[in-house]
Amino acid sequence: MLDHGCGEALLASDVAMLCERLYLCEAAPSLRQKLTARFAEIPNIVVTDPVAVADLAEASLDLVVANSIVQYLTAAELAQALRLWRHALKPGGRLLIADVLPKGLSPVTDARALLRFGWQGGFFFAALLGLLRTAISDYRKLRAELGLATYDEKEMIALLAEAGFKAERHRPNIGHNQARMAFLATPV
């Protein structure tokens, strides 16, 4: 299994018990170092970077999960990632792309979903503080300048088809925000 854009990989130990090998792919070098140290004693967890994903053997993976990364990729980067994932997936393997931002999604909707999640999870004030920090930080300006990639359902399914996948929308989204979308795809 490949968790592409794994972030903190909080459940990786549990997931690793269910698979032969778990690849944790993270772009940030400092986070990769932390993950490598944290999982050093678990032999079937391999921490890697996006460049090394291209070196995975053809048809070697049963599952690729890409949660909350598509919005940060350009169209060309997404096309390249889809080709890499298609190459690495076994026949019958699955690709789960989740937390895809639909066109027209309001930041207010995102903020409400985060606060609701925080309330349910017991970290409401931390979520609120995080939103306030983001609102006054350079991140807000940077996000406005760079933009985030958004897709509608038909567009994402067409992109997946172009890359050699049969895909459908998966409900529910695996993230806390159900205004965002998830897609499940298999190589064809």
Image (cartoon, rainbow, N blue to C red):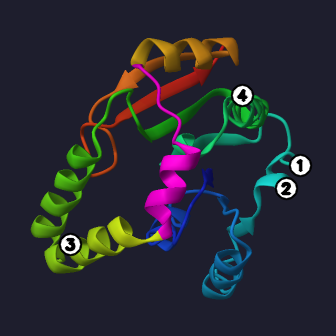
Q: CA distance from mark 3 to mark 4?
A: 35 Å
Q: Vertical placement of 51 versus 63: above or below?
A: below
> Mainly helix, strand or loop, the magenta region?
helix
Q: Vertical placement of 154 versus 119: above or below?
A: above
Nearest to N terminus: mark 2 or mark 4: 2
Q: Amino acid at mark 2?
A: Ala
Label 3 residue SS: helix
**Residue 148 located left or right of residue 106:** right
Splitting the image into 4 quarters, where does residue 60 fall? top right
Nearest to N terminus: mark 3 or mark 1: 1
Q: Which residue corresponds to mark 4?
A: 79
Label 1 residue SS: loop
Q: Which residues are magenta?
A: 138-152
Q: Which residue corresponds to mark 2?
A: 52
Q: Residue at x 50, y 15 (%)?
A: 155
Q: Vertical placement of 180 versus 39: above or below?
A: above
Q: Amino acid at mark 4?
A: Ala
Nearest to N terminus: mark 3 or mark 4: 4
Task: Categorize mark 3 by other alpha carbons within 10 Å: few (<14), some (14-19), many (20+).
Answer: some
Q: Amino acid at mark 3?
A: Leu
Q: Residue at x 89, y 49 (%)?
A: 55
Q: Amino acid at mark 1?
A: Asp
Mark seen at residue 39: none
Locate residue 182, reporting x and y percent. Answer: 40, 33
Q: Are marks 2 and 1 in contact (CB under 8 Å)?
A: yes
Q: Which residue corresponds to mark 3?
A: 128
